[in-house]
Amino acid sequence: MHRIFPALLALVLATPALAGEPPGVGADAPAFRLQDQNGDWHDLGDYRGQWLAVYFYPRDDTPGCTTEACNFRDNIYAFRAIGASVVGISVDDVDSHKQFADKYRLPFTLLADADGATARTYGVLRDFKLMKIASRQSFLIDPEGKIAKHYADVDPETHTQEVLADLEAAMAGGG
């Protein structure tokens, strides 16, 4: 019995409590009000009238998250050329985002969801009891504030190109 308890405790702590279901395609995107890496506040409504790629990621300055952020950075002009914005959200704080953005010269908004409330409303929060992270998922939000696409299975190496292709197709009337 004494050997079973530590194993059960480790299993409970290692198994994340999953957030609710992500909003479906066509649903209103959940509202948020969060601070960026410079301490400025952003609301979902600030992006009304334009396409918005919201990508959730686990942690600043970790390998997969850095790859994904740098791919968005390297393609930011393609997003801007078609009138779309990119926003990254994690449960890291403003200072962590500032260091991450400065280190990799990220020219887009990183929002601090330190309590995980926004990640929870998007159904991407993973609560490991001792720590919380946002799972690597993204949402494409249309100019009316509706979910146009949910990316539940994100490859940090190729995700940016996938989002750009979907944006271009949607803007051309193909989806």
Image (cartoon, rainbow, N blue to C red):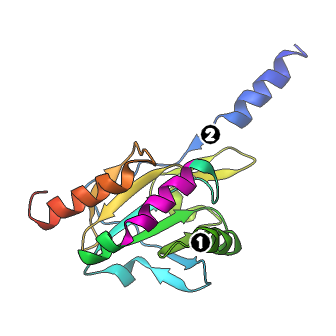
**Disc 2 marks which residue?**
16
**Disc 1 marks which residue?**
101
In the rendered structure, the answer to whether residue 152 lies left or right of residue 25 reads: right
In the rendered structure, the answer to whether residue 131 lies left or right of residue 123 reads: right
Report, in whole angstroms, how far the alpha carbon at label 1 lies from the one at label 2: 28 Å
Residue 76 at what x, y percent from top left?
A: 38, 71
Q: In terms of sequence position, does the residue under pointer 1 or pointer 2 come before the other?
A: 2
Q: Nearer the viewer, mark 1 or mark 2?
A: 1
Q: Which residues are magenta?
A: 64-76
What secondary structure is marked by label 2?
A: loop
Q: Amino acid at mark 2?
A: Pro
Query: Which residue is at 49% across, 49% downward?
Result: 136
Q: Main secondary structure of the magenta part?
A: helix
- Whether residue 83 is visible to the viewer of this picture, yes or no, is no
Figure quadrant of residue 65 = bottom right
- Whether residue 8 is visible to the viewer of this picture, yes or no, is yes
Residue 10 vertical placement versus 158 (above, below): above
Query: Which residue is at 68% across, 72% downward?
Result: 99
